[in-house]
Image: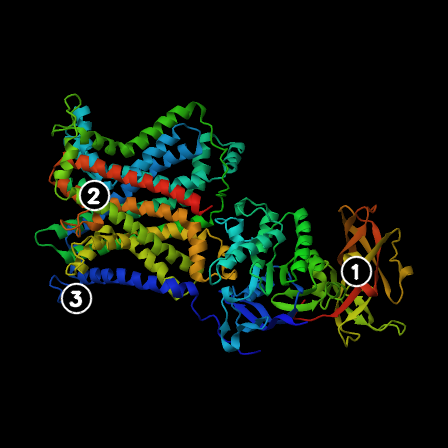
Amino acid sequence: MTRVAPMRARLGQRSKIFGLPIMVILLALIVPLLVRIVILAFSNSTGTAATLDNFVRIWNNGVGLQILGNTLLYTLGATFVAILVALVIAIIVERTDAPGRIAVYAMLALGFGVPSVIHGIGWTLIGGRVGILWNIFPWLQDVGPNLFYSWFGLCIVTGLRFAPIAFFLVAPALRAMDPSLEEAARVAGAGRFRMLTRITLGLSRPSLLAAVFLVGLLVVQHFDLPALIGTQSGFIVLSTEVYSLVQRNFPDYNGAAAYSIVLAIVAVIALVAYFRATAQAKRFGVISGKGYRSGRVRLEGWRIPSAILVIVLAFCTVVPVLVLLWRSFVTGNDFPCFTTCTYGFSNFSDIGSTAGLITSGVNSIVLGLLAGLIVVLLTVLLSWVTVRESNRITRLLDQLGSIPLVLSGILLSLAFLQTYAKSFLYNSVFLILIAYVVFYIPFGVRFTYSAVVGVRGELEEAASVAGARPTTVFRRIVFPLVLPSLLTAFVFIFLASMEQLSLVVFISGAGNPVVGPEIFRLWQTSSISVVAAFSVGVVLAGFIIVGAGWLISRLVTRHILR
Amino acid sequence: MTAVLRVEGVDKRFHGADGGTHALHEIGFEVEEGEFFTLIGPSGCGKTTLLRSLAGLETPDAGLISIGDLSVFDSSRRLNMRPEKRPTGMVFQSYAIWPHMNVFENVAFPLRCRPGRFSQSDRKRVSEILEIVGLGGYERRNATDLSGGQQQRLALGRALVGEPRLLLLDEPLSNLDALLRVTMRAELKRLQREVGITTVYVTHDQSEALSLSDRIAVFKSGQLLQVGSPEEVYNRPAQPFVGEFLGGANAFDGSLVPSPSSIPTGVGTARSSGGSRVVGTLMGDALTPGDDVRIVVRPDAMQLSTGNSSGAPQFESDTIYGLAATINQCMFNGSFSEVMVDTADGFRLNVIVPGTPRLTLGDSVTLTGSAEQTYIYRTTGAVA
């Protein structure tokens, strides 16, 4: 036998042309932040010596353990509420013939797209000290507000905020389910309820588990609602503790870094569980996805009650937005006011006269669009390289692409503050843009990876054999085919970046305002009238841009893809 | 005649957790100008890996591949030309029609990938090719709106438009329904002859291979077992497997016994491991009595007769043998029936009987075979 020359030790063309530069970019973006936060957590306040003291402090004072416990309780409670609400809505909307599907979808989309900080402020108008609820039910005046600001209220509010996200995670699996599996249960003698719980729910278990862990991951890192509601009653979680350590008169950056590393470790646990659940989802071969639609369960007498149930639940996810809308037109500070309200546009005209608000709106929109564009382009190339080639570079890219998933917004904010405080980027919109890009890379990867996997390898090979260079294969074949998914990812990242508070809370200021921190600051100085009007404006602007994006994407897909 | 494709010592292993597989065992052959050359074998035999190596989509570990005067792969010089540089056109099993381009753009793509602007003559060339493959007038049609057969033609047009030296076809008919497959087979043959292009065709369907090819290469487990014309590989299979795969031949073990001196040269007598006498053509030299052999006979090469339960020695001669058997199963198949029998010496054989025989399960029958259509091979360890 002839001596075999090792032909395969070479890197693929895609890794060479795209993989290496992307790897360099990601390393340059992520590594300094990680190094900075780890150094902070393991050094003393002057940065002169390595120490474990920051962690020992957490462990030794009772507060640290209580915060950890609070975080776990909060994550469990809020995730439970979110999944329960989402599941009830999803099963009734996707698997039964109950009416009102479009209304439910519209409300959930609204709830999904509205920033958390706006949800939170809306809820304080409903359940806070002078909330609408206690106006309607005055006999609850004493216990109501306390309950609202406690763990219980925080979990309900957070759960309702994340319910639309959980819904959009579980609904596709339920919709794609082969109804013959359910019909088989009916033929086997199961009643409607037993079929829905044993078969429908059972079959969607993998995607349900994935949703549980993903929502859990989002909740454990969540900052906005605990900051708006939890801190009022002293219910402190890891993310809000990091914030308060940094916001003190004498900031404890080392302690904050240590807490944020603990938070990252908790997130890693949720993430590992999530990856295991999704791996299982791939093996669950029951969901055929052939798109039959016929087999919805006939609810008969239960149709209307079921419809009312889902509409009420979906309404609960948007009620804070509607209250803010109402509040935005009420002039003066007398609220709630059922009969005595005076209405006008003065709150809206106050937006212009409040320093920084208009700028923050423009910044948020422009930075969101840019971040969406950059992340989508970066991650579609990353996904393409990792899907099609397997070598050391693609394996590293894979890992680099998911690292930010366990870095909570508050951790990254601290890391950006500490890494770039002395650089020219500090106080500039570019720093915020970089933060958005780093934070949304994992989300971009998720969207683009599945899109690229959907492009059959033979389509690319046919182009190669036809004489196309790798860059041409990408430009002429891959890119046009995944373009619809890229637009979806782009819109998602744009909307999500508008919602950012924790990620930019330490690095956005007078020089580079964006809407999240502006609303948060304004609300803390209790100008609720302007906050309400500005929030309404932000939501409106967001939806106008998403609507325009949707129109453009329809035109683009029609003209490029035909 | 000159060789358009030259393959020498092409070897490839896939490395895996289970120790990997030896996908290609030092394969070598040449394909002449204008030839229709078929690679056939069961799935996993390496035929597709080889085809993809010709296109540059797969990299062999060792060997040499040249197309025309162009060396496209040479492990000794560490040369591995990228797919886009090789003078090949390829039709994929799934056709790989780009759904976001219309019919014209799909075919125009290979020309657009060339340096220089897409010219008026390129435009003419595309229309010409569409005409040749029977898609004239479909230019503006959405590629995904075409039927299976039309997509097939489109893929063929796209592979031919750049005037490659070598056309590679990867099971192009396997996605069509049975009727269309027969029509497209004829169409493919006509096109190939008209265009005169050298073609390498991969299939696992023996009737496609036999009817289309000038020559056939039979593969098994990464090894090239036999190369020859359809008549050669069908009528003189070099190994038992070739006979079993092309034509679904029966095979059973036995050993060679001394033959009477009256027997023609090249014919030998064997005794099956169950004890029956069989005569057949000796495949391979220096087979001597006492050798373990494998006996191969096609289902259509034996006659089945009823009404005699004694083993029918009356037909036997130096070149004719008879086997007593009972009917196990009989499947009517239209113009013929497939009959499964159990021989008295313990083998299960398939026999094809024309028409509609009156057979009942358990009937005693006699199978008669001839030395001409029965092949005797020395049993080898390597290739069963």
The residue depicted at 59 percent of the width and 47 percent of the height is B148
The label shown at residue B345 is: 1
Q: Amino acid at mark 2?
A: Gly
For disc 2, the marked residue is A361
Q: Chain of mark 2?
A: A
Secondary structure of the residue carrying tag 2 is: helix
Give the class, few, some or many, for how many residues have Cα within 10 Å of label 3's Cα (few <14, many ≥20): few
| C-beta proximity under 8 Å, tags 2 and 1 | no
Q: Amino acid at mark 1?
A: Asp
For disc 3, the marked residue is A50
In the displayed structure, A474 sits above or below A122; it is below
Q: Position of residue A132 (x, y in %)?
A: 19, 28
Q: Is residue A503 left or right of residue B62?
A: left
Q: Position of residue B50 (x, y in %)?
A: 58, 65
Q: Position of residue B197 (x, y in %)?
A: 63, 62
Give the class, few, some or many, for how many residues have Cα within 10 Å of label 2's Cα (few <14, many ≥20): many
